[in-house]
Amino acid sequence: MYLSKKLHTALLAAAMSLAASTVMAADLRVGLSAEPSAIDPHYHNLGPNNAMAQNIFSRLIEQDEKQRLMPGLATSWKTIDDLTWEFTLRQGVTFHDGSPFTADDVVFTMERAVNVPNSPASFVTYIKGKTTIKIDDFTIQFKTERPYPLLPQDISTVPIISKKVATGATTADFNSGKAAIGTGPFKFVKWVPGDTLELVKNPTYWGDKAEWDRVIIKPIKSGPGRVAALLAGDVDFIDNVPPTDIVRLKKESKLQLSQGISNRVIYLHLDQLREDSPFVTANDGSKIKNPLLDVRVRRAISKAINRELIVERVMEGVAVPAGQLLPEGFFGVSPAMKPEPYDPAGAKKLLAEAGYPDGFKLTIHGPNDRYINDAKITEAIAQMLSATGIKTTPVTMPKSVYFKRASSGGPDKTPEFSFLLVGWGSGTGEASSPLKSLLHTYDKSKGMGAANRGRHSDATVDALVEEALATVDDKKRSDLLIKATELAVGERLGIIPLHYQVNTWAARKGIVYKARTDERTVLNLVTSSK
Amino acid sequence: MSVFIIRRLMQAVFVVWIMSLLVFVGVNIVGNPVDMLISPEADQAEIERVIKELGLDRPVHEQYWYFLVNALKGDLGNSFVFNQPALKLIIQRIPATFELAVVALLMAIIVGIPLGVYAGLKPDGKISKTIMATSILGFSLPTFWVGLMMIMVFAVILGWLPSFGRGETAPLFGIEFSFLTWDGLRHLLLPALNLSLFKMSLVIRLARAGTREVVHQDYIKFARAKGLSQNRIIFVHLMKNIMIPVVTVLGLEFGGLIAFSVVTEFVFSWPGMGKLIIEALQNLDRPVVVAYLMIIVVIFVVINLVVDVLYSVLDPRVRIQDLKG
């Protein structure tokens, strides 16, 4: 009796482990819209590369799916004084080649990440002004030149590589796999550019281990092509589902969608630099003083835009109307600011007050291959403004032509357009990123306002942003960022927010994804739903 | 004779040089690559560093001179995006595109000729009329749309064939080809068919026109009178004579097939040159665009040079005219 019971248990256990192993021993085939330009995690500081690096390499601090900071290769960090941060490193972590991770690797990484030859976009943005000091094998300190609260956010962007393997390694050594040794959830197997990228599970990963033994990533740039590959069962999981397909895919019983709001706000810049703006004229085509300099006109434009309608019709419901720079839940977001309600009468009244009872002529410029439905949004806004009296012509163009003209197409490398549509995703996951780049005065020497294509400029906003960037106390900094946003966006309308993008991933039934606000596809967040 | 060849060679070099100038200047007018490459969060100093590192701060004529000097050494510059030699990137993708184009060409011939001959032999039959009507569709439907429809029907609805990409490859003469494996062939079928539809229609029309002309020739009548079998007449006497125009035209069209593969490669995510050039154009990866166009220019110039030389060998009048001119 006892024996048979034992036998029974053993059989059951065997059967269970067999069932478990058929589920566990799994391949995941992924179709992605963008391909990294290199496996070298420091070569190209741009979306597709950073997303892929996250699979192979770990960071000292990781960002979770809502871009909140969490311990990575560092278990804790604290400020010693206003200029010194101390990080305690995780012990017992090994690289994919079995060698241990220590403080030397961190020091090496920080030096190498800013010195990659021919890097088309380096990590200097996040590393400059910081000195890395090894205290002991598992303690390091970062020194900054002045108080700098965003150090953890900056550090959370830099993938850690192995000093042993990567000393003297070139970008090509990473691409071939020789130096592509990290501490991340997956090990690199091979990369055939344009064709396949293959990863296998890292069984000694320090965090939650990945569910997939092997991941095969295929770049499928065409949106319909990606959807077809999923429907045909050639891949299990795709990113960037085109909005036009979402309704249809929701009805497919074999499939499952994962959606989440992103940190990307779509917004409008308005020329606040020039008295004589090139794409604004009077109704008869003659020159007028740039009306966009008048805050009443800017508010009238914001009131004339029906955000709900754009979200419902143009975006097919897959977006959220925006009233500020980041959606709710992010650091430095004002609880008071709501999307501007649609109010055409109020807009007309404001226009009349500003001295334009009959409106004026305006051209809105937008890209047609950069953001979700960008060209259609641009056209919708032109129609809405025309209905309120500002006769607006939409002009859209490919991003390769658009961004040069939008950033530096005018005389003396000034922005060329008067009124333009752009998007901004906050890499640090808090409000200082858009405030610093879009609303601070364009100032080369301070490195501020680099993407301020409307050249909004307000001394109070500048002071608030600069103070926030030097305030280490979280509560105080949050208050300063909120104040800056309420002033720059709410009162001054330095930019006009439209909506936050919502991203959609799709998978065959049984596979779910924790949609990330930073739009990245991180493969250990792809899990089978049980 | 050698004077003629030297003269033609000099002309060819001149054409390549003029093209390099046009291509380089044309590509440099559009956009600013740094806007495509840089992280949006980068500040002004970082943007300037990248502009400098890529050499974009130099005037265009200086950049061109630098390009020309290196090009003469066989270096067409490094890709801005991949930081690898542009020439190497393109050459790596050539086998995939070439394989696709060759298979498409073979399909066009294997399917097109029998259908065309049949339509030519029985011009009033119902089947012939259907073949001709279908060939008009082959001419007029956009490749992009047909490709997507093929994916919908054969991959999504019927599930017979894979929907994208290149299958397993196997080496031949040290180069990886996918037609050598079963998986590779399955992946190859749809894109090759998509690419070949246009040429297939062309072959059908050429074969039909040829057949219509040849069946009335005296030697066919004579063969019939002699009592030869229908099969022998068609496969030996007729086929030989209609092949001449078909082969000539297809030879000329092969270049076009490679150029058209851009669309097919994009729809089917086929990792060939076409996909590379589309992505290079979108990202303003100027060295890759320039290198690609230069390779195409050189290929065409070489083909024309060979044809010219052959003509002059075959026909002395060409040589004499040229010397006079």
Image (cartoon, rainbow, N blue to C red):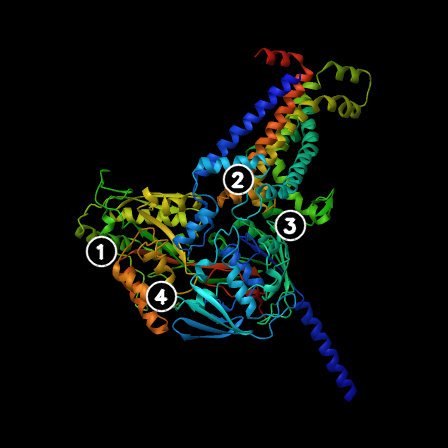
Disc 1 versus disc 4: distance between alpha carbons? 37 Å
- Bin the neighbour count of mark 2 within 10 Å (Cα to Cα): few under 14, some 14-19, many 20 and up: many
Residue where numbered disc 2 is placed: B289
Residue where numbered disc 1 is placed: A346
Q: Are marks 1 and 4 in contact (CB under 8 Å)?
A: no
Vertical order, A218 against A485 (above or below): above
Dot 3: element: loop
Q: Are marks 4 and 3 on the same chain?
A: no
Disc 4 versus disc 3: distance between alpha carbons? 52 Å
Observer able to see residue A189: yes
Q: Are marks 2 and 1 on the same chain?
A: no
Quarter of the image with the C terminus of chain A is bottom right
Q: Point out which mark residue A120 bears.
A: none
Observer able to see residue B141: no
Position of residue B164 measured from the top left corner of the image (x, y, whole percent): 61, 49
Q: Point out which mark residue A469 bears.
A: 4
Position of residue A389 measured from the top left corner of the image (x, y, whole percent): 24, 47
Position of residue A204 measured from the top left corner of the image (x, y, whole percent): 63, 70
The amino acid at mark 1 is Gly
Residue where numbered disc 3 is placed: B162
Disc 2 versus disc 1: distance between alpha carbons? 51 Å
- Looking at this view, name the residue that lies furthest to the right: B227
Query: Is A313 in front, or is A202?
Result: A202
Disc 2 versus disc 4: distance between alpha carbons? 42 Å
Q: Earlier in the sequence, mark 1 or mark 4?
A: 1
Position of residue B142 measured from the top left corner of the image (x, y, whole percent): 54, 37
Indicate the quadrant where residue A150 lies. Answer: bottom left
